[in-house]
Image (cartoon, rainbow, N blue to C red):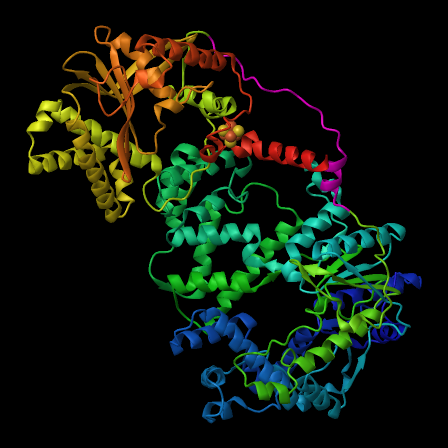
Amino acid sequence: MAPVTPAILSALADGVTAITPNRRLARQLLRDFDRAQQARGHVSWRSATVLPYTTWLETLWRRSTDVAADMSAMTLLTSAQSLHLWRAIVDAAQADLLDPAGAARLAADAWALIHGWGAGGESWRAWRRDADFADDPAVFATWAETYSREMHRSGALDFAQLPDVLALHARRLAPGALRAMFVGFVELSPQQQRLIVALTSQGADIGAAESLPERTPTASRTASASTREEIIAALVWARERAKERPDARVGIVIENLARHRDEVLRLADELLCPELLLPEQLAMRRPYEVSLGTALAEVPLVLAALGLIALGEGQLPVGEVASLLRSPYLPAADTAWPGRAAIERDWLESGQRDVALSDVIAAAQQRSPELAARLHGARDALRKGAGASPREWADAWRTWLSAAGWPGSLTLDSVEHQAREAWEALLADFVRLGMVAPRLTRADALRTLRAFAQDRVFQPEGSDAPIQLLGLLEGSGLVFDALWVAGLSADRWPPAPTPNPLLPLHWQRECSVPRATAEGELEYARALTARFAMAAPEVVFSSAAAVDDLPLAPSALLLEYPECTSPMPAARTWTHTIARSATLECVVDDHAPPVAAGTIIAGGSGIVAAQSDCPFQAVARHRLGVKPWPPALAGLSQMERGKLLHATMAAFWNALRDHASLALLDASARATHIEAAVARGFTELTAARWRVLPAIVRAGEAQRVATLLGAWLPLELSRPAFTVVGTEIKTTLELAQLRLSLRIDRVDALDDGGVVIIDYKSGRSEQPRQWFDERPRASQLGLYTLATPAAEAASPVRAVAYAQMRPDAIKAIGLAADAGAWPDLTELSALDRFPDWGDLETWWRTRLGALAVEIAAGWAVVAPRKSPSPCRYCGLQAMCRIDSVQLADDEERADE
Ligand code: SF4
C-alpha cells in the first residue's frame, strides 16, 4: 500500500503538527503514520497530530483565549451562527430577492473571500461609495457593513476573520514551541500566508510539505462512449485492481461527483458488490466509500424527525406526510407500514392536498390505531405560544419526537447511529443560535432548523474501504496505488470560472481569487492534473466522447499523456448481464381460482365489460380489488363528477316523473326544477368532502351540471310520451353460473307500450354498429336489457340508449326496436344484423353468457382488445406488465 512520503512520516514522529486542507487527507495521514509504526515493529507510539486547517485555527483560538483576557471576552461564531446572521441581514434589507437563503450563502462566501484573498483591510467600504461598481457589490457592501457592525457590537468574530485576529495577536500566542507543516495544499491564500509569517516571526517553525511522493508520472488517458460507460469502465478497472491486490488503495476521482453521485452509487453497487441484489445482504459492508456526503436534511432518519416536527407545527402537503407515515423511524413501522401507507390513498381519493396533525390522527384511527393513539397522546408535548428561545424550541422538539416514538422500534445500524448523533449535534448548534437570535417565532425556528439541516453535510465515518470514490477537491493530495480520474472532457476541464457575483470582478482578478477567472482556472486545473498524475504508480485520465449526442474532445490538459485503448474490456452491469444471459422459463398462468356457482360477483356490469375488454383487467380490478394509484387532484375527481351528474338526473326525474309534466314547464319553472335537482344531487358527496373543496369548485360544478341538464331536456321533449318508471334501479341478473348485481340509471315506460332503458354517460359513447364485436362492447345496455324482463315482464324493452352528457356533444345514442320508440336512435333494422329485437336479446344472452362463463372459470389472460385499446384508461400496467411483454416482442423483432 502506498504511504505518504517518508519525510512527512518522520516529521509526524518528531511531533510536528500536520495541517491538511480537508478531513480526508488528515485521516489518511494518521492511518499511514500508524501503519508505518506497526511496520517498524512498534507496539505503542506517540500519536501523530494531524488537523484539518479549521480545526487547527480553533486550537490556536482556544490557546489565545486561555492567555489573553480581552480575547476570551470574544465569541467565535460557528459557521451556522454567522450564516444565520447573514440571513437576518439579507431579510432585513427587504431586497425583494427570489432566494434570500441563497443570497445569504453567497454573502457569507463573499465575506470569506474578502478575508482570505484580500489584503486584510475592509475593502468592501470602497465598493459602497464607488458609483462605478455594479449593483450587486454595492448591495453586498451595505450588508457587509451591517454584519461587521453587528459582530463588533456583540463582541464576536467568525472563521473568516479568525486567521487575521490570530496573526494580530501572534505574540500573545507564544508560538515558540509551535512546529507545524501545511500538507497537501494546492495553494495558500494570502490570509494563510499572513498568519504563517506572523507566527514564524514570533519563533514558530511552520513549513509546507508535499504529500505526494517524487516519481516519474506514468499516467495515460482513455475515452469512453458516454459518461455512463466511462464510470462503468472506471469501476470495473478499480474492481480488478482491488482483486489483484487486496491491500491496494484504489481511487476513482470524478469531476462533478455531486451531479453524478446517484448514478455512480447505483453502478458501484451493481459492479462492486452485486451481492446487494440479494435482499438478505442489504446490511453488507460495501467495498467502496464515497467522499461526497449528503445534506443531513436528506438522511432518512433526520428527514423523519424534521417531518414530525413540521407536522407538529402546522399543515404539510399530503405527499410529505404520506412519506413520513411510511418511514421506518416510527414505532412498529416494520409491521404497521402497509396500513399507514394506505392512508395516502384515502387522502388522494378524497382530494385532500394539505393535512395537519389532527387529520393524521383521524386517518390513522382506522388504518393504524396504535399510531393514532400515540400521536394523540403526544400532542401535549407540542409547544404552545408563538415565540421562544432556540433552547426552548430545541427542548420542545426533543420531547415531541420522543413522545411520537421517533426513531422507532428498530435497532439502529452504525450509519443510523451516526445520523442520530449528527441530529443531536445539529440541535446543539441550533441552541447556540441564541447568541445571535435570542428569540425566534415558530415559523423562523422551523425554517432555520431546516436550513441548518440542509446546509450540513452528513458523511458517515470512513470504513477504510479499498476503493475510494472522490470529488476533485477531496482526491487532491491523497496517495493511491492506482488512480482513475474521470470526467476530464474539454468542456469541463479546466472548469468554467464561477466568480462570486457579489464581489467586483476586477477585485477578484487582482487578488487571484480562486474560481474567478479563466486564467486562474486553467492554472488550477493544470496544477491539479499534474498532482493527480503523481498520486499513484498507475493513473488513468478519462473523458466521455459524447454527452447527450454532443461530441466531446478530451481536455487539452490530458494530451501530453499517452493514449491507451480502454484499459478494461467494455463491461455490462450485473442486472444487464443477468437479464441478457437468463434462459427464461415460460409458465402459463392465465387462470384465477374459479367462482362458485350462484356467487354474487363484485363489480356488477363492470366486471362483464372488463372481461370483454381484457380478462386480466376483470380479475385484477374486480376480484383482487386492484386499483390504480389515484392522481393528486386539485378539485373533484372524474368519478365524483360522474356521481354528481347521475344523482342530479335522478333527482330531476324523481321529482318530475313524466314527459307531460316536462312539457308543461315554462323556461323559468324548468330552471327552478333544474336548480332544485342540482341541490339535491349534490348531497351525494358528504359535507366533509365539500368542506375541503374551495367554494368556487362547488359553484362551478353546479353550473356545469345545470347547463348539461338544461341542454339535454329538449331531447327528452322531442321523444314520444313516457313516464319514468324508476331511477337508479337495483336488480340482479343470473347469467351462466353467475349472479350479477346491477344498477340501472333509468327505465321509462312509453305511453304506447314497452320500456326504454337509459344509461347516463359523461364520456363519449360508442355507436350501435360498434357494439357487436366478437367480444361485445357496450355490454352494460345488453345486461340491463336481459335483466329488465324479470322486473318488467309485462313491458318488453323497445329501446336502449346512452344519454351522452358531454358539453360538446349532447345526444342520445342507442338502438330502438321501431321508429316509434325513440326516433333519434338507430332503428334495429338499419343494422342488417338482427331480424327482430328477440334475436338481439339472444345474441346478448349468448355472448354475455360466454363472458360470464369465462369469469366463473377465472379466465385471466392478459389479452386487451386491439381497438379501441382499454389499456389507455386502465392504469394496471404495473401489474399486468403488458409494456414489458410488448418491449420483449419489439426486441425479438429487432433481433430477427
Ligand atoms: S393495462 Fe391493458 S393489458 Fe393490462 S390489465 Fe389493463 S387492459 Fe389489460
- How many numbered markers are drawn? 0
Q: Which residues are magenta?
A: 572-596
Where's the C terminus, which quadrant?
top right
Q: Nearer the viewer, residue 262 or 84?
A: 262
Q: Where is residue 562 drawn, in percent x and y? A: 87, 67
Q: Where is residue 567 drawn, in percent x and y? A: 85, 56
Where's the N terminus, which quadrant?
bottom right
- Was residue 74 drawn as part of the magenta stretch in this picture? no
Q: Nearer the viewer, residue 698 or 882?
A: 882
Identify the residue at the far right of this view.
41
- Was residue 581 drawn as part of the magenta stretch in this picture? yes
Q: Which image quadrant is residue 698 in?
A: top left
Q: Is residue 597 left or right of residue 756?
A: right
> Is residue 68 visible to the viewer in this orientation of the structure?
no
Query: What residue sits 72% from the left and 41% below the top?
Result: 576
> Is residue 873 visible to the viewer in this orientation of the structure?
yes
Q: Where is residue 122 drawn, in percent x and y? A: 54, 90
Q: Is residue 550 left or right of residue 483?
A: left
Q: Which image quadrant is residue 650 in?
A: top left
Q: Where is residue 767 drawn, in percent x and y? A: 35, 26
Query: What residue sits 55% from the left and 65% below the top?
Result: 455
Query: What residue sits 28% from the left and 12% below the top?
Result: 788
Taken as a whole, is the magenta stretch helix, strand or loop? loop
Q: Is residue 287 left or right of residue 140?
A: right
Q: Nearer the viewer, residue 102 or 452?
A: 102
